[in-house]
Amino acid sequence: MSKSWTRKDLLGLRDLSREEIELILKTAESFKEVSTRPIKKVPTLRGRTVVNFFFEPSTRTRASFEIAERRLSADTISFSSSGSSMEKGETLLDTMKNIEALKADLIVMRHSASGAPHRLSRSISAGIINAGDGTNEHPTQALLDMFTIKEKKGRIEGLRVVYIGDILHSRVARSNIWGLLELGAHVTVCGPKTLLPIEVDKLGVRVTTKVEEAIEGADAITLLRIQLERQKEPFFPSVREYASTFGITRERLKVAKKDVIIMHPGPINRGVEIADDVVNGPFSVILDQVTNGIAVRMAVLYLLSQVRG
Amino acid sequence: MSEKKILDGEGIERASIRIIHEILERNGGTAGLVIIGMRTRGAVLARRFADQIREIEKQDIPVGALDITLYRDDLTEIGPQPLVRGTEIPFDINQKKIILVDDVLFTGRTVRCALDALVDYGRPACIQLAVLVDRGHRELPIKADYVGKNIPTAVGEEVIVSLTETDGAEEVIVKRKDA
């Protein structure tokens, strides 16, 4: 395994090698322990400044990053686009140049436009962590998903991992597909045909519109929320019909592996993509994902913090 | 470059056994004692010390491993970050007598990091330092309580400890640059 990290930014999993992904996951294992201590803090990033810029609503990811930064003793400040000068007509690049002039070492950003962090990373010397760009990638979410799978299953290679729901708008699915395929998992995507990207099969994943077919023999299943906010036109007749066709119930899980794990990047819509008794049931690792998110983000912040472009 | 072997396998074993007897003597047995080794080779030595104490005293004592990477004050100076290998202290250290173990004591900066790290886990009754080799050149006011061997060295020289578990060999050598 490669022992050092050389990238200034974490923009996505598409470009990462197996060694790089494994280094992040391995580093995260050590950071998980920090959050179990009576004093949940290490001085590693003391004196470093991390700016969290969320141009799109986020509670989970933002809180997770802020906690990760504080547990590493970094100084942090968070902005959201509402209430910032973006509303007064400043361009994204100008806003970011100003942030850089404040001498930020790392910028965590979420933006509704796919590719926004990639564009900025070329003109800004601070390290950029993509916390979700449009429908493109959400690398730290995928890394925490992979961390959780590895923690529960002991490995990733050879496992059958399934994504059900709105694949079309899901940056979580996209990042996971790149990462999981690189690590040797078998990935299946499932959803209404209107919510499956065109030529998704060309990525090397199995595609099906039949939920029973997707679940059969699965080791890990991730349910994706129907992102109504990204849907300008209807993609399926009704939420009720979606729930009865694709919603995951105990009954439907019977054909999965006996030790299947159920994951969800949140926020969950109980009774739509996932039934109540599945959320609360023994297969659910949804809250483990949240806890693991802190360790994975600490690992990413740590690895990036020493590399300057 | 020339190399000089300072300790062989037997030498390391004799030094370790003496350290253990000193620890037991000074602390009056194993009551309240825990051993924490600094990764990587200090943790190996700590594990061995605990095994040897079990043979002598017929008592199990808790052993932990400490990774000080996250406490280093030179992370910005050493280029790519070192791999974080994780701390495993699966017991409460409050009011315990901690024997902190490392292979080589040099500037004292690593020990300083370890002390910072340990107090984040609780408030031990005391911390005593045991090292296999003390090579001098301290940059901080830190002194070992138990020393396997004092080795006078020049700053530019390198002290290399090899242990079977991590390196497949058992020896301490000093590498010096020829004039």
Image (spheres, helix red, strand yellow):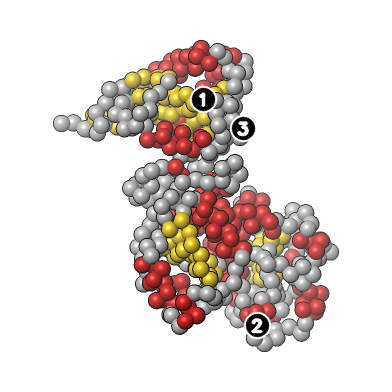
The picture places residue A95, in percent across and down from the top left corner, at 42, 74
Residue plotted at (27% across, 26% down):
B153
Contact between labelled residues 1 and 2, with CB atoms less than 8 Å apart: no
Residue type beneath disc 1: Cys
Viewer-side residue, B106 vs A189: B106
Q: Residues within 10 Å of mark 1 (few under 14, many from 20)?
A: few
Viewer-side residue, A70 vs A10: A70
Subunit under mark 2: A
Against A243, residue A49 (above or below) is above
Q: Secondary structure at mark 1?
A: strand
Looking at the image, is mark 2 or mark 1 nearer the viewer?
Answer: 1
Residue type beneath disc 2: Gln
Using residue B3 as the reference point, say whether residue B53 is left or right of it. right
Pointer 3: what residue?
B91
Q: Quadrant of residue B163?
A: top left
Q: Looking at the image, tell me whether mark 3 or mark 1 is earlier in sequence order.
A: 3
Pointer 1: what residue?
B126
What is the residue that sits farthest to the bottom in this orientation?
A: A233
Q: Quadrant of residue B142?
A: top left
Subunit under mark 3: B
Residue type beneath disc 3: Phe
Pointer 2: what residue?
A231
Disc 3/disc 1 C-alpha distance (Å): 16 Å
Contact between labelled residues 1 and 3, with CB atoms less than 8 Å apart: no
Same-chain check, marks 2 and 3:
no
Instruction: Tell me if I can see residue B53 in this picture.
Output: yes
